Amino acid sequence: MFTIDQIKKVVEENKEEALQCLIEALKSPSPTGSELPMAETMIRWLKKAGLSVEIYEYMKDRPNVLAKWQGSQEGKKFLFNGHFDVFPPSDTNDPDYNPWSGEIKNGYVYGRGASDMKSGDCAALIAVMLLKKMGFDPKGSITINYVSDEENGGTYGILPMLDAGLIEGDFGISMEPSSLGVVLEHGGTYPCRIVIYGDGGHASRKINSADKENIYGGEDAIKKSVKALQALYKLQDEVIDKKPVSGDCKSNLAVTRIMAGNVVNNYARRAEILIDRRYLPTETPESVDAEIIGALEEVKKSDPTFTYEFHSHYEPDTPVFKVPEDSLIVQTLDEVCEELLGSKPKHWKIMGGADASYIRRAIGIDMPWFGPGSRDGGVATTEERVFIEDYLNCIVVYMMTMVKMMS
């Protein structure tokens, strides 16, 4: 079996190729909905690594990929999971800002997705490529799965792949950013939508509540929405903020979008409020529904004409995620990190969300997050970057973990 010193030497000898893969990925724009350039780059590198590549599309030009390395002996199935898509470029007045630069500066590589999660994507690919070059023969199979649409909930990515039975594994790693720590648990992400109705008419005069079309007390949907927003913010301040904290996990309710009206010179008869609700493992989607509906029903008590519809799951929700601390894959990551870095990695509990939670729910495998990207707030900013040393160390960890798990 290979030693960690042998693997470190191989990674150092192939450092430039590893960096080239990451730079090309960062120069491939891939905001959610436009993942094709990144997919094409990674498919080219997967084929260069000698892997068989299968492509699945559930929307045109939004590929999902399975790349498999089958060993000569039967055995376990190791699964890497990552995503092609990234958040849109930042709004900035800086004329020098290039979200797709792949620039190397002061020991970092910069670009949108450097942290979340192109560095993790490339680290897994390079780790497999270098192990193949070293002549490693896995007992079983190693699969790299890249998907589109992760940031929007996986409707055109991981969810249909799971529905089709394409995703297999006995254990694995999600290459999401974890600052080279191990994310074992995260809360659920629960998007929902409130539709609110109001009276209308021409904006040149006050709403005529006597008009037969007006049945909501003479108030338009925007004015009604203000009451709903006040109730939601009260729910956040007086109930959700007071819920217990678990690690870095904390419940939260965020109003993220408001839409109302069609034209500037007419009152809005309909408004929509979008909510991102993050919940702890001790909560449930049913309890989340009950809290929001309860807050809206309080509005209705003081305004009997307040009329709304509550729609949960307007997008797929990310379920609560938890991997046992004593699972084999977590113990192996701890052991490898201690060999390489001199100490065990930090174990995280966070409020986030990743496709690993869907995979765990569907097929039950232990799949912690472990990736080189930073958890310090540097995701989706003009300064998004990854520390080169972390990227290279992550490749070593992935390689040694595969050797230990698949020998």
Image (cartoon, rainbow, N blue to C red):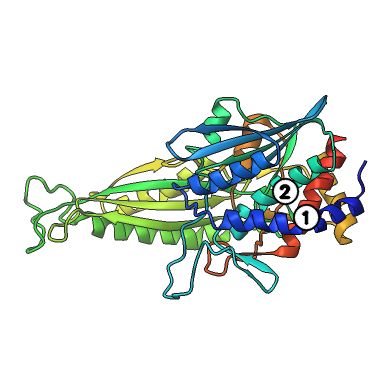
**For residue 126, which numbered disc appears in the image?**
2
**Quadrant of the image for the N terminus?**
top right
Label 2: which secondary element:
helix
Are the residues flagged by discs 1 and 2 in contact, CB closer than 8 Å? yes
Tag 1: residue type? Asn
State which tag comes first along the sequence, 1 or 2. 1
At x 8%, y 56%, the residue is 208
Question: Does residue 244 appear in the picture of this structure?
Answer: no
The x, y position of residue 308, in whole percent, is 30, 46
**Quadrant of the image for the C terminus?**
top right
Label 1: which secondary element:
loop
The x, y position of residue 300, in whole percent, is 30, 50
At x 63%, y 46%, the residue is 282
The x, y position of residue 243, in whole percent, is 59, 56
The x, y position of residue 197, in whole percent, is 24, 48
Tag 2: residue type? Ile
Q: CA distance from mark 1 to mark 2?
A: 9 Å
At x 42%, y 61%, the residue is 233
**For residue 14, which numbered disc appears in the image?**
1
Left or right? Give the position of 401 relative to 112: right
At x 74%, y 44%, the residue is 129
**For residue 360, which numbered disc appears in the image?**
none
User: For mark 1, does the 10 Å Cα neighbourhood hold few (<14), some (14 to 19), or many (20 or more) residues?
Assistant: some
The residue lying toward the viewer, choosing from 204 and 145, is 145
The residue lying toward the viewer, choosing from 323 and 234, is 323
User: For mark 2, does the 10 Å Cα neighbourhood hold few (<14), some (14 to 19), or many (20 or more) residues?
Assistant: many
